[in-house]
Image (cartoon, grey):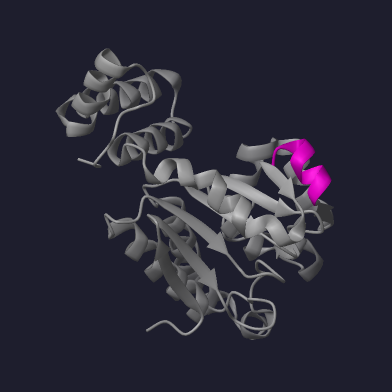
């Protein structure tokens, strides 16, 4: 049983809930529990979409600095690999994932949110990579996932200065996909992914993997990744259901079973 991270499933949507008072500091234990939660929702066929949520007050204000401050290079060389692995497990969830962000998503908190496919922010939310103010750099994907999302110049601005970015600016630069009143963040995230809960799970997985893996390679290799996923879906029941429904009833009326 996890102490600080729990998984709640309803209507095909799993919520990975961080609950480590007061600020959801991402200690080594929390990191391990996040990896376990990612593995759980990835393996559960009843889960069709996922929400990352830190609660009504804060998403995650960063790493546990007290825990990290006493470490030297030998310890951090190993621990940094475990940190990246836990977040990579979230990025690799083969289902649509949205981060529901209230309050602060700073440092490791923002890096965790970057592992989601989408981000919904409350109006008063603040995001940033303040590691430079501690004499270090982001170590859980901030220098890699952030520039891929918002471009290198804007990412460098956040990383070099350590400043906080508000929700309106995050929306303007593409870091946020939607901004809503603080009290509506979780429901907005559920509404965003609810459409996927009844969707073709295997096709959604293929689409996510094709996009994510394709971004890591040259165009020709990316097109081959796409082609292989595309062809493989013709072995699924959902492809037969979708196309037969289209021919008989028109678009958007197919019922998918995830097979």
Instruction: Please tell me whether residue 99 is drawn above or below residue 169 in the rendered image.
Output: below
Q: Residue at horizontal 61%, vertical 69%?
A: 54
Q: Nearer the viewer, residue 228 or 41?
A: 41
Residue 38: tell me if it is visible: yes
Q: Residue at horizontal 43%, vertical 62%?
A: 85
Image coordinates for residue 234, horizontal then vertical, percent: 19, 24
Quarter of the image for residue 89 reads bottom left
Residue 221 in magenta? no
Report whether 199 appears left or right of 162: left
Quick one: which residue is furthest to the top in this view? Answer: 247
Image coordinates for residue 63, horizontal then vertical, percent: 64, 73
Numbered label tally: 0
Quarter of the image for residue 60 reads bottom right
Q: Which quarter of the rendered picture does the N terminus lie within?
A: bottom left
Residue 115: tell me if it is visible: no
Report whether 249 appears left or right of 97: left
Q: Residue at horizontal 25%, vertical 25%?
A: 228
Q: Which quarter of the rendered picture does the C terminus lie within?
A: top left
Report whether 45 appears left or right of 76: left
The part of the chain drawn in magenta is 167-176
Q: Which of 47 and 160 is in front in this view?
A: 47
Instruction: Please tell me whether residue 226 is drawn above or below residue 171 in the rendered image.
Output: above
Q: Nearer the viewer, residue 148 or 195?
A: 195
Image coordinates for residue 23, horizontal then vertical, percent: 69, 77
Quarter of the image for residue 113 reads bottom right
Instruction: Please tell me whether residue 154 is drawn above or below residue 49 in the rendered image.
Output: above
């Amino acid at each position: 049983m996890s102490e600080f991270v729990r998984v709640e499933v309803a209507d095909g949507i799993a919520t990975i809930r961080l609950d480590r008072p007061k600020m959801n500091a991402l200690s080594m234990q929390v990191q391990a529990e996040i990896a376990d939660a990612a593995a759980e929702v990835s393996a559960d066929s009843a889960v069709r979409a996922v929400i990352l949520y830190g609660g009504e007050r804060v998403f995650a204000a960063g790493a546990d600095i007290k825990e990290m401050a006493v470490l030297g290079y030998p310890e951090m060389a190993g621990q940094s690999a475990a940190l990246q692995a836990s977040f990579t497990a979230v990025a690799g969830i083969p289902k649509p994932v949205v981060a529901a962000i209230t309050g602060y998503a700073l440092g490791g908190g923002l890096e965790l949110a970057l592992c989601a496919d989408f981000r919904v922010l409350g109006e008063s939310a603040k995001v940033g990579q303040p590691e430079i103010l501690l004499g270090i750099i982001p170590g859980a994907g901030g220098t890699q996932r952030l520039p891929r999302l918002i471009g290198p110049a804007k990412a460098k601005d956040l990383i070099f200065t350590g400043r906080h970015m508000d929700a309106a600016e995050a929306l303007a630069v593409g870091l946020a996909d939607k901004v809503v009143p603080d009290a509506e963040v979780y429901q907005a995230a559920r509404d965003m992914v609810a459409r996927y809960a009844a969707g073709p799970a295997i096709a959604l997985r293929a689409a996510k993997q094709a996009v994510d893996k394709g971004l890591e390679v040259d165009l020709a290799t990316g097109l081959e990744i796409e082609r292989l996923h595309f062809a493989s879906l013709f072995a699924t029941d959902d492809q037969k259901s979708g196309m037969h429904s289209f021919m008989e009833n028109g678009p958007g009326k197919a019922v998918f079973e995830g097979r």
